Image: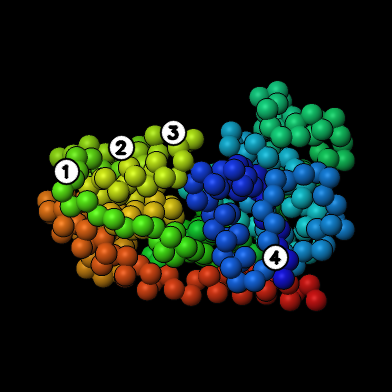
Amino acid sequence: MKVLITGSTSPQASRKTALRSPTFASLIYYSLHSQGASVDLVEPSISMTEAELAEYDAVLVGIAPPTSIAATRLYPAFAIANRARNVGNLILFIDSPEPYKIPAAIKSCHINISDLQKKFYQTRKSYLEFVENHDFQTEVYDFIEYLYTETWPTTLYPAFPWSVDESVRKAIPNAGELVAVNLDSILVKSGNITPNLELKRTYWVCDAPNTRWAEGTAETLVYPVVATKKSHWDPQETTLTRMREAVGTLVSLYRSNEVWWSPALAQSLSVGTPVVTEWRHSEILGPEWSLLASTVEGMSTSERFDLAVAQKDYYLGAVSGWSVDLLQTVKNNRNQLH
Protein backbone atom coordinates (compact mmCIF):
# COMPACT_ATOMS: atom_id res chain seq x y z
CA MET A 1 0.00 0.00 0.00
CA LYS A 2 1.29 3.43 -0.98
CA VAL A 3 0.31 6.62 0.88
CA LEU A 4 1.11 10.31 0.36
CA ILE A 5 0.91 12.80 3.23
CA THR A 6 1.07 16.55 2.74
CA GLY A 7 -0.76 19.63 3.94
CA SER A 8 -1.39 23.35 4.22
CA THR A 9 0.85 24.12 7.21
CA SER A 10 4.35 23.35 8.36
CA PRO A 11 3.23 20.74 10.94
CA GLN A 12 1.17 19.02 8.25
CA ALA A 13 3.84 18.81 5.54
CA SER A 14 7.33 19.52 6.85
CA ARG A 15 9.69 16.73 7.86
CA LYS A 16 11.94 19.33 9.54
CA THR A 17 9.08 20.41 11.78
CA ALA A 18 8.35 16.78 12.63
CA LEU A 19 11.95 16.30 13.73
CA ARG A 20 11.68 19.23 16.17
CA SER A 21 8.40 18.14 17.69
CA PRO A 22 5.87 15.36 17.08
CA THR A 23 3.01 16.30 14.79
CA PHE A 24 -0.18 14.51 13.84
CA ALA A 25 1.17 14.07 10.31
CA SER A 26 4.45 12.58 11.50
CA LEU A 27 2.64 10.14 13.81
CA ILE A 28 0.46 9.03 10.90
CA TYR A 29 3.63 8.54 8.89
CA TYR A 30 5.35 6.44 11.56
CA SER A 31 2.23 4.39 12.27
CA LEU A 32 1.51 3.45 8.66
CA HIS A 33 5.20 2.89 7.89
CA SER A 34 5.58 0.55 10.88
CA GLN A 35 2.66 -1.51 9.56
CA GLY A 36 4.27 -2.06 6.18
CA ALA A 37 2.92 0.80 4.08
CA SER A 38 5.11 2.82 1.73
CA VAL A 39 4.59 6.38 2.99
CA ASP A 40 5.80 9.71 1.59
CA LEU A 41 5.56 12.79 3.85
CA VAL A 42 6.29 15.66 1.48
CA GLU A 43 5.94 19.37 0.89
CA PRO A 44 3.04 20.10 -1.47
CA SER A 45 4.01 21.00 -5.02
CA ILE A 46 1.90 22.15 -7.93
CA SER A 47 4.10 20.05 -10.21
CA MET A 48 2.52 16.86 -8.83
CA THR A 49 0.11 15.63 -11.52
CA GLU A 50 -3.09 13.63 -11.27
CA ALA A 51 -1.26 10.72 -12.90
CA GLU A 52 1.36 10.79 -10.14
CA LEU A 53 -1.29 11.04 -7.45
CA ALA A 54 -3.13 8.08 -8.97
CA GLU A 55 -0.13 5.90 -8.08
CA TYR A 56 -1.07 6.23 -4.40
CA ASP A 57 -3.78 4.23 -2.67
CA ALA A 58 -4.49 7.26 -0.50
CA VAL A 59 -3.52 10.93 -0.59
CA LEU A 60 -3.80 12.50 2.86
CA VAL A 61 -3.99 16.29 2.75
CA GLY A 62 -4.05 18.43 5.88
CA ILE A 63 -6.29 21.46 5.70
CA ALA A 64 -6.36 24.69 7.67
CA PRO A 65 -8.35 27.93 7.50
CA PRO A 66 -7.36 29.48 4.12
CA THR A 67 -6.88 32.87 5.79
CA SER A 68 -4.71 31.58 8.64
CA ILE A 69 -1.17 32.90 8.99
CA ALA A 70 -0.08 29.31 9.58
CA ALA A 71 -1.43 28.14 6.19
CA THR A 72 1.84 28.89 4.41
CA ARG A 73 1.46 25.97 1.99
CA LEU A 74 -2.24 26.35 1.28
CA TYR A 75 -2.09 27.05 -2.47
CA PRO A 76 -0.24 23.90 -3.59
CA ALA A 77 -1.91 21.79 -0.86
CA PHE A 78 -5.41 22.73 -2.00
CA ALA A 79 -4.44 22.17 -5.64
CA ILE A 80 -3.17 18.68 -4.79
CA ALA A 81 -6.32 17.98 -2.78
CA ASN A 82 -8.46 19.00 -5.74
CA ARG A 83 -6.52 16.70 -8.05
CA ALA A 84 -6.73 13.81 -5.58
CA ARG A 85 -10.46 14.45 -5.33
CA ASN A 86 -10.68 14.01 -9.10
CA VAL A 87 -8.65 10.81 -8.87
CA GLY A 88 -10.80 9.56 -6.00
CA ASN A 89 -8.14 8.77 -3.40
CA LEU A 90 -8.39 11.88 -1.20
CA ILE A 91 -8.46 11.70 2.60
CA LEU A 92 -8.43 14.93 4.60
CA PHE A 93 -6.99 15.52 8.04
CA ILE A 94 -7.18 18.38 10.51
CA ASP A 95 -4.78 18.86 13.40
CA SER A 96 -5.31 22.25 15.06
CA PRO A 97 -7.61 23.21 17.95
CA GLU A 98 -10.84 25.09 17.31
CA PRO A 99 -11.75 23.47 13.97
CA TYR A 100 -14.79 25.75 13.67
CA LYS A 101 -12.38 28.32 12.20
CA ILE A 102 -11.95 26.22 9.03
CA PRO A 103 -15.51 26.46 7.61
CA ALA A 104 -15.73 30.12 8.66
CA ALA A 105 -12.60 30.97 6.65
CA ILE A 106 -13.72 28.80 3.73
CA LYS A 107 -17.02 30.67 3.57
CA SER A 108 -15.20 34.00 3.67
CA CYS A 109 -13.08 32.98 0.68
CA HIS A 110 -15.97 31.44 -1.22
CA ILE A 111 -18.12 34.55 -1.08
CA ASN A 112 -15.10 36.76 -1.85
CA ILE A 113 -14.87 38.57 1.48
CA SER A 114 -11.29 37.35 1.80
CA ASP A 115 -8.89 37.79 -1.11
CA LEU A 116 -6.22 35.07 -1.20
CA GLN A 117 -4.28 37.01 -3.84
CA LYS A 118 -3.53 40.08 -1.73
CA LYS A 119 0.06 40.92 -0.84
CA PHE A 120 -0.55 40.03 2.81
CA TYR A 121 0.00 36.40 1.72
CA GLN A 122 3.05 37.02 -0.46
CA THR A 123 5.37 34.97 1.78
CA ARG A 124 3.32 31.85 1.22
CA LYS A 125 4.74 29.04 -0.84
CA SER A 126 3.83 29.36 -4.56
CA TYR A 127 2.26 32.80 -4.06
CA LEU A 128 3.58 34.26 -7.31
CA GLU A 129 2.52 31.21 -9.31
CA PHE A 130 -0.93 31.44 -7.74
CA VAL A 131 -1.34 35.12 -8.57
CA GLU A 132 -0.08 34.73 -12.15
CA ASN A 133 -1.57 31.36 -13.13
CA HIS A 134 -5.31 31.32 -13.79
CA ASP A 135 -5.50 27.51 -13.94
CA PHE A 136 -3.75 27.26 -10.57
CA GLN A 137 -6.23 29.75 -9.08
CA THR A 138 -9.13 27.77 -10.53
CA GLU A 139 -7.93 24.56 -8.85
CA VAL A 140 -7.61 26.23 -5.45
CA TYR A 141 -10.97 27.98 -5.65
CA ASP A 142 -12.64 24.84 -6.98
CA PHE A 143 -11.48 23.02 -3.88
CA ILE A 144 -12.67 25.84 -1.64
CA GLU A 145 -16.07 25.67 -3.35
CA TYR A 146 -16.08 21.89 -2.83
CA LEU A 147 -15.34 22.26 0.89
CA TYR A 148 -18.09 24.87 1.22
CA THR A 149 -20.85 23.20 -0.79
CA GLU A 150 -20.29 19.45 -0.67
CA THR A 151 -19.80 16.62 1.80
CA TRP A 152 -16.15 16.08 2.62
CA PRO A 153 -14.39 12.77 2.08
CA THR A 154 -13.12 10.72 5.02
CA THR A 155 -11.58 13.18 7.48
CA LEU A 156 -9.09 12.21 10.19
CA TYR A 157 -8.64 14.17 13.39
CA PRO A 158 -6.40 13.56 16.42
CA ALA A 159 -8.25 12.51 19.54
CA PHE A 160 -7.94 11.49 23.16
CA PRO A 161 -9.84 8.44 24.41
CA TRP A 162 -12.43 10.84 25.85
CA SER A 163 -12.86 12.93 22.69
CA VAL A 164 -16.27 12.86 20.98
CA ASP A 165 -17.13 13.22 17.30
CA GLU A 166 -20.08 15.47 18.06
CA SER A 167 -17.99 18.53 18.85
CA VAL A 168 -15.96 18.17 15.65
CA ARG A 169 -19.04 17.50 13.56
CA LYS A 170 -20.70 20.58 15.00
CA ALA A 171 -17.64 22.63 14.08
CA ILE A 172 -17.42 21.14 10.56
CA PRO A 173 -20.99 20.40 9.44
CA ASN A 174 -19.90 19.35 5.92
CA ALA A 175 -17.71 16.55 7.25
CA GLY A 176 -18.66 13.13 5.98
CA GLU A 177 -17.01 10.23 7.77
CA LEU A 178 -15.05 11.53 10.75
CA VAL A 179 -12.35 9.20 12.03
CA ALA A 180 -10.82 9.83 15.45
CA VAL A 181 -7.15 8.84 15.51
CA ASN A 182 -4.85 8.36 18.49
CA LEU A 183 -1.25 7.30 17.90
CA ASP A 184 0.11 8.40 21.28
CA SER A 185 1.48 4.94 22.04
CA ILE A 186 4.33 5.80 19.65
CA LEU A 187 5.32 8.72 21.87
CA VAL A 188 4.65 7.10 25.23
CA LYS A 189 6.73 4.03 24.44
CA SER A 190 9.61 6.05 23.02
CA GLY A 191 10.30 7.90 26.25
CA ASN A 192 13.10 7.36 28.72
CA ILE A 193 11.91 7.49 32.33
CA THR A 194 14.81 8.32 34.64
CA PRO A 195 13.21 9.85 37.73
CA ASN A 196 15.21 12.21 39.89
CA LEU A 197 13.25 12.03 43.14
CA GLU A 198 15.65 14.46 44.83
CA LEU A 199 14.95 17.30 42.39
CA LYS A 200 12.71 20.03 43.80
CA ARG A 201 10.08 20.84 41.22
CA THR A 202 8.89 24.44 41.25
CA TYR A 203 6.74 24.90 38.13
CA TRP A 204 4.06 23.31 35.96
CA VAL A 205 4.07 23.09 32.18
CA CYS A 206 1.05 23.55 29.94
CA ASP A 207 0.49 23.02 26.22
CA ALA A 208 -1.70 26.16 25.93
CA PRO A 209 -1.24 28.34 29.04
CA ASN A 210 -3.27 31.26 27.69
CA THR A 211 -6.61 29.46 27.42
CA ARG A 212 -9.39 30.22 29.89
CA TRP A 213 -9.17 26.69 31.32
CA ALA A 214 -5.41 26.89 31.87
CA GLU A 215 -5.57 30.33 33.44
CA GLY A 216 -8.37 29.22 35.76
CA THR A 217 -6.43 26.13 36.80
CA ALA A 218 -3.27 28.16 37.36
CA GLU A 219 -5.13 30.31 39.89
CA THR A 220 -5.60 27.21 42.09
CA LEU A 221 -1.87 26.41 42.16
CA VAL A 222 1.08 27.57 44.24
CA TYR A 223 3.69 27.06 41.56
CA PRO A 224 3.67 29.03 38.28
CA VAL A 225 2.61 27.57 34.94
CA VAL A 226 4.94 27.88 31.93
CA ALA A 227 4.53 26.79 28.33
CA THR A 228 5.76 23.34 27.36
CA LYS A 229 7.66 25.06 24.53
CA LYS A 230 9.22 28.47 25.08
CA SER A 231 9.85 28.80 21.35
CA HIS A 232 8.48 27.33 18.16
CA TRP A 233 12.04 26.28 17.46
CA ASP A 234 12.59 24.33 20.68
CA PRO A 235 13.92 20.85 19.88
CA GLN A 236 11.95 17.96 21.32
CA GLU A 237 14.62 17.08 23.88
CA THR A 238 14.40 20.59 25.36
CA THR A 239 10.65 20.20 25.73
CA LEU A 240 11.01 16.76 27.31
CA THR A 241 13.61 18.02 29.80
CA ARG A 242 11.29 20.88 30.79
CA MET A 243 8.49 18.35 31.34
CA ARG A 244 10.73 15.91 33.20
CA GLU A 245 11.61 18.58 35.77
CA ALA A 246 8.04 19.90 36.21
CA VAL A 247 5.48 19.21 38.92
CA GLY A 248 3.09 18.06 36.22
CA THR A 249 1.72 18.81 32.77
CA LEU A 250 -1.57 20.61 32.20
CA VAL A 251 -3.37 19.67 28.97
CA SER A 252 -5.78 22.45 28.20
CA LEU A 253 -9.31 22.70 26.93
CA TYR A 254 -10.26 25.30 24.33
CA ARG A 255 -13.22 27.47 23.35
CA SER A 256 -16.36 26.45 25.27
CA ASN A 257 -14.21 23.91 27.14
CA GLU A 258 -13.74 21.75 24.05
CA VAL A 259 -11.31 18.83 24.12
CA TRP A 260 -8.49 18.81 21.57
CA TRP A 261 -5.56 16.46 21.25
CA SER A 262 -2.05 17.55 22.16
CA PRO A 263 1.21 15.57 21.98
CA ALA A 264 2.08 17.05 25.38
CA LEU A 265 0.05 14.39 27.18
CA ALA A 266 1.95 11.44 25.71
CA GLN A 267 5.28 13.27 25.96
CA SER A 268 4.71 13.91 29.65
CA LEU A 269 3.85 10.30 30.39
CA SER A 270 6.91 9.19 28.43
CA VAL A 271 9.22 10.99 30.90
CA GLY A 272 7.37 10.05 34.09
CA THR A 273 5.56 13.34 34.74
CA PRO A 274 1.85 13.19 35.67
CA VAL A 275 -0.82 14.81 33.54
CA VAL A 276 -3.84 16.84 34.57
CA THR A 277 -6.65 17.80 32.22
CA GLU A 278 -10.37 18.36 32.76
CA TRP A 279 -11.24 15.47 35.08
CA ARG A 280 -14.89 15.38 33.96
CA HIS A 281 -13.62 14.06 30.64
CA SER A 282 -10.54 12.03 31.56
CA GLU A 283 -12.01 10.23 34.58
CA ILE A 284 -13.34 7.51 32.26
CA LEU A 285 -9.81 6.03 32.33
CA GLY A 286 -9.77 5.52 36.08
CA PRO A 287 -9.20 7.30 39.40
CA GLU A 288 -5.66 8.34 38.46
CA TRP A 289 -7.19 10.45 35.71
CA SER A 290 -9.75 12.21 37.92
CA LEU A 291 -7.44 14.35 40.07
CA LEU A 292 -7.33 18.12 40.32
CA ALA A 293 -4.05 19.90 39.66
CA SER A 294 -4.00 21.23 43.23
CA THR A 295 -4.23 17.67 44.55
CA VAL A 296 -1.31 16.56 42.42
CA GLU A 297 0.71 19.58 43.51
CA GLY A 298 0.24 18.56 47.13
CA MET A 299 1.79 15.13 46.56
CA SER A 300 5.41 14.23 47.22
CA THR A 301 7.76 13.78 44.27
CA SER A 302 7.67 9.99 44.61
CA GLU A 303 3.86 9.99 44.81
CA ARG A 304 3.65 12.04 41.63
CA PHE A 305 6.02 9.67 39.88
CA ASP A 306 3.92 6.66 40.93
CA LEU A 307 0.84 8.51 39.66
CA ALA A 308 2.49 9.10 36.27
CA VAL A 309 3.36 5.39 35.96
CA ALA A 310 -0.23 4.40 36.77
CA GLN A 311 -1.61 6.98 34.34
CA LYS A 312 0.68 5.64 31.64
CA ASP A 313 -0.59 2.08 32.10
CA TYR A 314 -4.24 3.15 31.98
CA TYR A 315 -3.64 5.35 28.95
CA LEU A 316 -1.79 2.75 26.91
CA GLY A 317 -4.60 0.32 27.59
CA ALA A 318 -7.16 2.84 26.37
CA VAL A 319 -5.38 3.63 23.08
CA SER A 320 -4.23 0.12 22.13
CA GLY A 321 -5.43 -0.88 18.68
CA TRP A 322 -5.94 2.64 17.33
CA SER A 323 -3.00 2.26 14.92
CA VAL A 324 -4.73 -0.74 13.36
CA ASP A 325 -7.92 1.30 13.02
CA LEU A 326 -6.02 3.98 11.08
CA LEU A 327 -4.54 1.41 8.73
CA GLN A 328 -7.98 -0.07 8.14
CA THR A 329 -9.41 3.36 7.32
CA VAL A 330 -6.73 3.89 4.67
CA LYS A 331 -7.31 0.40 3.29
CA ASN A 332 -11.02 1.06 3.07
CA ASN A 333 -10.31 4.18 1.07
CA ARG A 334 -8.17 2.10 -1.32
CA ASN A 335 -10.89 -0.53 -1.67
CA GLN A 336 -13.31 2.14 -2.84
CA LEU A 337 -11.00 2.79 -5.79
CA HIS A 338 -10.69 -0.81 -6.97
- Work out whether residue 208 can be spotted: no
Q: Is residue 142 left or right of residue 111?
A: right
Query: Crowdedness of circle 2 by 10 Å Cα count: few (<14), some, many (20+)?
Result: many
Q: Position of residue 146 (x, y in %)?
A: 73, 52
Marks 2,3: beta carbons within 8 A: no
Between disc 3 and disc 4, whose residue precedes? 4
Between disc 4 and disc 2, whose residue precedes? 4
The residue tagged 3 is: 231
The residue tagged 4 is: 38
Q: Position of residue 169 (x, y in %)?
A: 53, 60
Q: Amino acid at mark 3?
A: Ser
Q: Amino acid at mark 4?
A: Ser
Marks 3,4: beta carbons within 8 A: no
The residue tagged 2 is: 226
Quadrant of the frame with the C terminus:
bottom right
Q: Amino acid at mark 2?
A: Val
Q: Residue at x 12, y 53 (%)?
A: 300
Q: Is residue 119 left or right of residue 280?
A: right
Between disc 2 and disc 3, whose residue precedes? 2
Element on which disc 3 rests: loop
Query: Crowdedness of circle 3 by 10 Å Cα count: few (<14), some, many (20+)?
Result: few
- Quadrant hosting residue 275: bottom left
Q: Residue at x 32, y 47 (%)?
A: 243
Name the mark nearer the viewer: 1 or 3. Answer: 1
Element on which disc 2 rests: strand
Between disc 1 and disc 4, whose residue precedes? 4
Name the mark nearer the viewer: 4 or 2. Answer: 4
Q: CA distance from mark 1 to mark 4?
A: 46 Å
Query: Crowdedness of circle 4 by 10 Å Cα count: few (<14), some, many (20+)?
Result: some
